Image: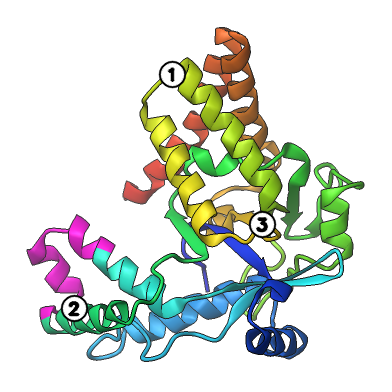
Amino acid sequence: MVLPYTAYLRVYQPVTALPRREQAYWRTYAESSANTGRAEALAAEHADTVHRLVATPPVLAPERESRDAYVRVWGGGVYVCPWQTRLRSWLAVREFRSATPARISAAFVPEPVALAAEEAFQRWRDQGEPLRTHILTSTWGIPLPWFAPFAAGERRLVLDAGPDPATARGDAGVNARSSAAGADRTEALPGTQPGRALVYVTETATARRRLEHVIGVLEARLGESAALGAGRRLEDWLSGIAHPGSLLELDYGGLVHLMDDDELRDDESVAEVAAAITGLETGNEELTVAMYQRVTQRWKSMQALEHAN
């Protein structure tokens, strides 16, 4: 089974910040067999979606919201990122239908099924339920603003043969705490590609400070621009969903299967975006242009694969 070529930006909330009844559930969940680890959770999410969509008629969203989550143990605390499968499915269907001509979308999603899903979503919204998700997704590439909240030393690269010593940096500080706490597991389900991952993790408070700095530089140097707007939207999402003590994770997800080992080793997108911002801040135009071209060329090449024959 090959995972979809999708990357993920996830917010993990501290269990201690949740209502008491929720705390008990998620603590039990984290210690149970239901907590299978990041790689298995990705595969399970994908398999569930495929089974629903190949049904006749297709099931666009589950009848009930998922009670599963991605789990991290960090500094002795438990953090969860709920799947929110039902909400994310509704939002994905809306996005697909708005971006696809009606004749084409109907070939994939029968109109009666789509209308029924929309009505269910509207009833759910009328109850005053929140519409923000803990997970953002991006297919065939990663938006440049997603790299801004992280530092190069927070990268964790795992190749098929296990952790790569050449890139297992950060033996002290955040990366070491993450690893020592068992924050990332790489056991794979039968049929998946084992252990292959590129992940960044940091405290959301730190991530927001970095993002605010980037937004300030963009605002001062470029003024109103697409880059500034994208940064502000990311900041708005974090401020609306993330607890001050939460964690933020950038997971390359299925994109790692489009890249060979050397390409993964050479991927320094976080460091390149940081260098481009430094060049912009200090007036070093040559550095800014060089780093911007380097990172954008990498992801343009990746995005071009979406339309490859």
Marks 3,1: beta carbons within 8 A: no
Q: How crowded is mark 3: few (under 14 residues within 10 Å), some or many (20 or more)?
A: some
Q: What residue type is labelled 3?
A: Pro
Highlighted range, magenta: 95-111
Q: Residues within 10 Å of mark 2 (few under 14, many from 20)?
A: many
Q: Residue at label 3?
A: 244
Mark before the other along the chain sequence, 3 or 2: 2
Q: Which amino acid does label 1 sit on?
A: Leu
In the image, taking residue 278 as reference, residue 60 lies left or right, namely left
Mark before the other along the chain sequence, 3 or 1: 1
Q: Residue at label 1?
A: 222
In the image, taking residue 282 as reference, residue 51 lies left or right, namely left
Image coordinates of residue 32 in percent, x first then y, are 74, 90
Q: In this view, does 91 lie above or below 138?
A: below
Of the numbered discs in the image, which one, if any, rests on residue 5? none
Considering the numbered disc 3 on the image, is that residue within a helix, a strand or a loop? loop
Residue drawn at 65 percent across, 67 percent down: 13
Q: How crowded is mark 1: few (under 14 residues within 10 Å), some or many (20 or more)?
A: few
Image coordinates of residue 271 in percent, x first then y, are 67, 32
Q: Residue at label 2?
A: 114
Q: Distance between the residues labelled 3 and 2?
A: 37 Å
Image coordinates of residue 245 in percent, x first then y, are 71, 59
Q: Distance between the residues labelled 3 and 1?
A: 29 Å
Image coordinates of residue 291 in percent, x first then y, are 58, 22
Considering the numbered disc 1 on the image, is that residue within a helix, a strand or a loop? loop
In the image, taking residue 99 as reference, residue 125 lies left or right, namely right
Q: Which of the pair 154/129 is nearer the observer?
A: 129
